Image (cartoon, helix red, strand yellow):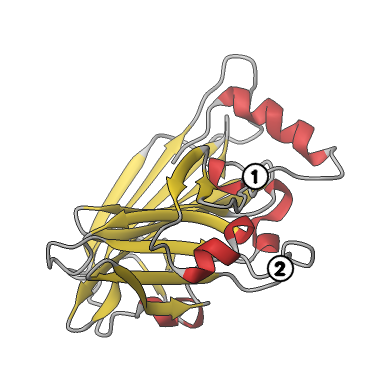
């Protein structure tokens, strides 16, 4: 995830504001409970057979998606809830996975260890940038920073009876300076680091970052962290060329 030069101008404006805004549509917490329906991201869906929490706490839904996570041919529902919008800055967020049991949504996984809190995005505000399911993989995106920006993506696969982190990507940098990209395949140990200076016509960086370069290597990871353990898991290691990876 890289940010273009016009966004640099916007970021300076954000720094001068007393209030920050969220990057993605998932920040729109204007979900409302109605008599027979729930409004989610401007789409009205029937509340019939929805999980009770989705009906009662529709205004606390930060993001949701559906897809088959355990390869049984039946789609699961993944919902991210805030706990308290008034005092939400440091409050944990709940990620809940629901299974459909003959038309009834039943809670399968409930964890507060998968999604960042509202105050962890820095000057850019709430870092949560969405949840999705692609080819059976659960994907959670975050981003934040100020003029220097970061983003990261966690990818989870259901295997051996639980959800494990099998992929991690991150980007760090500043428009018109440089971007660093990290990509870790935890299942295979494959790691890629790439460095790319960014030159802008209307802005000259104070540093000469040299040419772009890339490094590929393998770092075996013995124990994959679970979805329910993610925020309690940390791992730091260096590449052969001395770049430090953080998970």
| Relative side of 114 to 103, left or right | right
Vertical placement of residue 228 versus 148, above or below: below
Q: Are marks 2 and 1 in contact (CB under 8 Å)?
A: no
Vertical placement of residue 70 versus 169, above or below: below
Residue at image mark 1: 22
Can residue 242 be seen? no
Question: Which secondary structure lies at badge 2?
Answer: loop
Quarter of the image containing the N terminus? top left
Q: Where in the figure is residue 155, as x and y percent of width and height?
A: 32, 62
- The foreground one among 56 and 233 is 56
Near mark 2 (Cα within 10 A), the count class, few <14, some 14-19 or many ≥20, is some
Residue at image mark 2: 84
Q: Earlier in the sequence, mark 2 or mark 1?
A: 1
Vertical placement of residue 239 versus 113, above or below: above
| Relative side of 241 to 83, left or right | left
Q: Where in the figure is residue 95, as x and y percent of width and height?
A: 47, 69
Q: Where in the figure is residue 20, as x and y percent of width and height?
A: 75, 45
Near mark 1 (Cα within 10 A), the count class, few <14, some 14-19 or many ≥20, is some
| Relative side of 124 to 43, left or right | right
Residue 195 figure quarter: top left
Q: Residue at x 31, y 70 (%)?
A: 104
Question: Which secondary structure lies at badge 1?
Answer: loop
Vertical placement of residue 153 versus 157, above or below: above
- The foreground one among 76 and 141 is 76
- The foreground one among 245 and 210 is 245
């Amino acid at each position: 995830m890289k940010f273009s030069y016009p966004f640099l101008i916007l970021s300076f404006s954000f720094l001068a504001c007393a209030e920050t805004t969220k990057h993605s549509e998932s920040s729109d917490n204007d979900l409302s409970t109605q008599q027979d329906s729930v409004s989610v991201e401007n789409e009205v869906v029937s509340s019939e057979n929805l999980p009770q929490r989705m009906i009662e706490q529709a205004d606390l839904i930060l993001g949701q998606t559906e897809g088959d996570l355990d390869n049984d041919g039946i789609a699961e529902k993944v919902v991210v809830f805030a706990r308290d919008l008034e005092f939400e800055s440091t409050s944990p967020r709940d990620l809940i996975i629901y299974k459909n049991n003959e038309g009834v949504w039943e809670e399968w996984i409930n964890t507060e260890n998968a999604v960042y809190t509202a105050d962890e995005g820095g000057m850019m505000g709430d870092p949560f940038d969405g949840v999705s399911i692609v080819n059976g993989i659960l994907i959670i995106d975050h981003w934040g920073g100020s003029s220097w920006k970061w983003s990261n993506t966690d990818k989870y696969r259901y295997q051996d009876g639980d959800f494990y982190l099998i992929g991690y990507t991150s980007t760090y940098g500043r428009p018109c300076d440089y971007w660093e990209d990290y990509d870790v395949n935890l299942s295979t140990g494959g790691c890629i680091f790439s460095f790319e200076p960014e030159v802008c016509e209307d802005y000259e960086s104070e540093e000469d970052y040299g040419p772009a370069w890339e490094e590929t290597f393998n770092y075996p990871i013995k124990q994959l962290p679970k979805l329910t353990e993610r925020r309690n898991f940390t791992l730091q290691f260096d590449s052969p060329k001395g770049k430090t990876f953080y998970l």
